[in-house]
Image: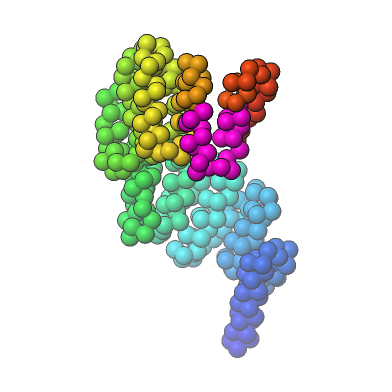
């Protein structure tokens, strides 16, 4: 009895040393320690789990899966052990991109621990990859409740509702899409991404008026990618014989956010096409007052000066440089 107690204490010490080695990134040392443990005690489930985990980090995914799966048939496993085994398997299957099995394993973790935040976040990641927005919304609400609102998941829920609306639009189900878009705005009024998707939809339906209406709404939002719709919107204005509205539209955007270089650039291009280079120069000069170190803004200013001087060859070179800067 005393001998078994001493042996168990010795193995426990070895396991602690192995965990420390893993923490320090000394995988080979950890493997040696863990191998000694399971040699002396074949029922040390946690040591086997850690061996599989190390194999996974080393890229031996099939080896990790083999070890972890072999543990599932062991008798007399408590819920804590089973939870850790299925957690390890979920991570194994994710590495081999078997999302179906990874999802199944994460759900088994929840079977033993319904309030497991890790498993819910893991499933959310899978639902995102599969573009399963309905389940993503459900799991987000669960995570929000489990974390007691520590992380605001409303923004994510709104985004997923918008993506589900887009999916409905792609299937030409406008009414269903609109319902999801309305819900997304109630959850997060700042989210205007639905306006982009509706604009794209109506443009395909040859309804340029409605497309412009929704794109303008999106362009006036706080979305960091809103500038990507500027060119599309200008083309739509042109196609709808409303090109003169471009000036007023971008002036309003710049009035709200003078730092929006993309909006400034579009207005400058508008004046260039009109041959009004003096007005274009005024805009870029105003922008440079607060952004003197902006490479792109200085290039645009130089380009306008070159155009006024009549050096068309140098202007072409500058346009290429500006395009490269915009793509960064």
Position of the N terminus, as image quadrant, is bottom right
**Rendered residue at 51%/28% (across/down):** 281
Residue 163 can be seen, yes or no: no
Percent x, y of residue 36: 70, 70
User: Which range is magenta?
Assistant: 281-303
144 lies above or below 19: above
The one nearer the camera, 218 or 295, is 295
Residue nearest the observer in this picture, 119 or 38? 119
Q: Quadrant of the C terminus?
A: top right
Q: Which residue appears at 56% of the width and 42% of the height?
A: 292
Q: Is residue 285 magenta?
A: yes
The relative height of residue 255 versus residue 66 in the rendered view (above or below) is above
Q: Is residue 133 above or below residue 117?
A: above
The image position of residue 132, as x and y in percent, is 41, 37
Instruction: Judge from the rendering whether residue 317 lies leftward or rightward of residue 304; answer left or right.
Output: right
- Report the side of 189 relative to 293 (left or right): left
User: For residue 50: magenta?
Assistant: no
Q: Nearer the viewer, residue 247 or 139?
A: 247
Name which quarter of the figure residue 55 lies in: bottom right
Q: Main secondary structure of the magenta part?
A: helix
Q: Is residue 96 visible?
A: yes
Which residue occupies 61% across, 81% down?
Answer: 9
The reply, left or right, for residue 279 in relation to residue 292 is left
């Amino acid at each position: 009895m005393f001998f078994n107690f001493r042996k168990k204490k010795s193995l426990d010490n070895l396991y602690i040393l192995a965990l420390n080695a893993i923490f320090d990134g000394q995988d080979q040392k950890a493997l040696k320690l863990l191998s000694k443990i399971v040699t002396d005690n074949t029922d040390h489930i946690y040591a086997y789990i850690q061996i599989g985990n190390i194999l996974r980090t080393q890229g031996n995914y099939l080896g990790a899966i083999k070890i972890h799966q072999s543990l599932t048939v062991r008798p007399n496993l408590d819920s804590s052990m089973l939870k850790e085994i299925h957690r390890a398997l979920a991570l194994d299957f994710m590495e081999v991109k078997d999302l179906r099995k990874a999802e199944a394993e994460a759900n088994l973790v929840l079977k033993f621990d319904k309030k497991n935040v890790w498993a819910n976040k893991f499933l959310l990641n899978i639902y995102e990859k599969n573009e399963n927005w309905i389940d993503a919304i459900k799991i987000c609400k669960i995570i929000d409740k489990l974390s007691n609102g520590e992380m605001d998941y409303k923004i994510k829920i709104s985004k997923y509702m918008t993506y589900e609306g887009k999916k409905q639009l792609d299937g030409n189900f406008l009414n269903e899409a609109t319902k999801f878009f309305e819900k997304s705005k109630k959850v997060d009024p700042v989210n205007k991404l639905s306006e982009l998707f509706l604009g794209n939809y109506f443009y395909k339906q040859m309804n340029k008026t409605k497309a412009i209406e929704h794109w303008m709404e999106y362009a006036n939002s706080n979305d960091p990618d809103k500038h990507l719709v500027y060119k599309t919107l200008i083309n739509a204005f042109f196609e709808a014989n409303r090109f003169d509205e471009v000036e007023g539209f971008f002036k309003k955007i710049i009035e709200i956010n003078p730092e929006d270089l993309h909006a400034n650039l579009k207005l400058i291009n508008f004046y260039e096409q009109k041959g009004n280079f003096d007005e274009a120069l005024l805009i870029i000069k105003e922008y440079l007052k607060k952004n003197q170190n902006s490479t792109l803004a200085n290039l645009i200013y130089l380009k306008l000066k070159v155009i006024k001087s009549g050096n068309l060859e140098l202007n072409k070179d500058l346009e290429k440089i500006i395009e490269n800067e915009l793509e960064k």
